[in-house]
Image (spheres, grey):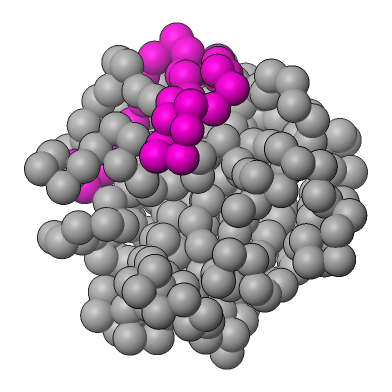
């Protein structure tokens, strides 16, 4: 729904305006910070992986990534440049940290990643930065736990910081807050706000929830919050909240954007 609103230039429509206005301070920050590469953490919606083959964690290691038909018609073909050397460095580092990844030397880029980039850099042109896509299984059991996702994020942060080339890396967690496809309109605003508070002040407290807890509180698709937890693990430590907006409803989903600026100079962003 957000992607279609962007394609239709509906950012000023009353229904969408509060959501899109939340990105105005993010755009100002990005114009000053000028990141070189975005590590985009999201869950695949059947574009690369389906119920017969569902990796727990997957990472792209391609020179470029293309979009594709996700079930509602062939979209305008687009190409997103990869950051291949950084991808392989992250892969090697995560494997050394005992994380078993599905490494994808060819990978289609899902709307969950594309929409995040389109929100950060408005317009219909190519993305101005390179991309490392990381996919988290939030679809089919067995699912990674919040604690495992936070540890993955910590290992990802170590990998990025150990990369020998001097790059400005933006870590993006792209996934919805409370929502459930079978219960359209199910939104738990209180739990969404709790998650937004704790992701800043006490992220490890969120790892105490089980997957069943999250489903009960935020719906089955609320498990997409795992992408935020990975993001926060990657920039563990004290962060400054540059922007924070929450708006409902967007496609029957708790919709938010948070920009966290880490004291060590790295940054992270969670959206949707």
Q: Quadrant of residue 21?
A: bottom right
Q: Main secondary structure of the magenta part?
A: loop
Farthest bottom residue?
190
173 to 144, vertically: above or below: above
Residue 227 against residue 181 in the figure, above or below: above
- Front residue of 107 and 13: 13
Quarter assignment of residue 133: top left
Locate the C terminus by quadrant: bottom right
The one nearer the camera, 204 or 213, is: 213
| In the image, residue 72 above or below residue 128 | below
Q: Residue at x 44, y 26 (%)?
A: 68
Task: Pick the residue in front: 68 or 74.
Answer: 74
Please state if 137 lies on the left or on the right of 258 as rendered.
Answer: left
Out of 245 and 262, give the one closest to the viewer.
245
x, y (%) of residue 151?
33, 55
Where residue 223 appears, as percent x and y from the top left, is 36, 66
Q: Which residues are magenta?
A: 55-84
Q: Residue at left 30%, top 42%?
A: 46
Q: Residue 23 magenta-drawn?
A: no
Any part of residue 35 in sight: yes
Q: Residue at x 79, y 55 (%)?
A: 20
Query: Residue 25, can we see it?
Result: no
Query: Please, which residue is most extreme toward the front here?
Result: 73
* Whole-percent x, y for residue 8 in the image: 76, 41
**Left or right of residue 56: residue 84:** right
The residue depicted at 32 percent of the width and 78 percent of the height is: 215
């Amino acid at each position: 729904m957000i992607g279609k609103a962007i394609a239709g230039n509906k950012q000023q429509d009353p229904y969408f305006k509060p959501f899109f206005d939340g990105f105005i301070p993010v755009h100002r920050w990005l114009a000053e910070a000028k990141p070189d590469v975005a590590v985009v953490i999201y869950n695949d919606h059947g574009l690369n992986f389906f119920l017969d083959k569902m990796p727990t964690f997957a990472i792209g290691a391609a020179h470029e990534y293309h979009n594709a038909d996700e079930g509602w018609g062939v979209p305008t073909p687009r190409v997103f440049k990869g950051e291949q050397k950084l991808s392989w460095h992250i892969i090697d580092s995560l494997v050394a940290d005992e994380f078993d990844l599905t490494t994808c030397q060819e990978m289609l880029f899902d709307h969950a990643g594309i929409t995040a980039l389109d929100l950060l850099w408005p317009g219909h042109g190519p993305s101005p930065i390179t991309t490392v896509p990381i996919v988290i299984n939030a679809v089919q059991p067995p699912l990674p736990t919040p604690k495992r996702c936070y540890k993955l994020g910590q290992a990802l942060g170590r990998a990025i910081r150990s990369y020998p080339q001097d790059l400005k890396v933006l870590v993006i967690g792209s996934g919805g807050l409370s929502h459930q496809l079978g219960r359209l309109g199910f939104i738990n605003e209180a739990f969404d706000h709790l998650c937004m508070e704790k992701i800043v002040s006490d992220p490890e407290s969120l790892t105490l929830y089980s997957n069943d807890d999250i489903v009960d509180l935020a719906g089955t698709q609320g498990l997409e919050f795992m992408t935020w937890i990975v993001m926060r693990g990657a920039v563990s430590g004290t962060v400054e909240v540059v922007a924070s907006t929450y708006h409902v409803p967007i496609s029957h989903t708790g919709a938010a954007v948070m920009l966290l600026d880490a004291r060590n100079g790295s940054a992270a962003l969670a959206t949707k």
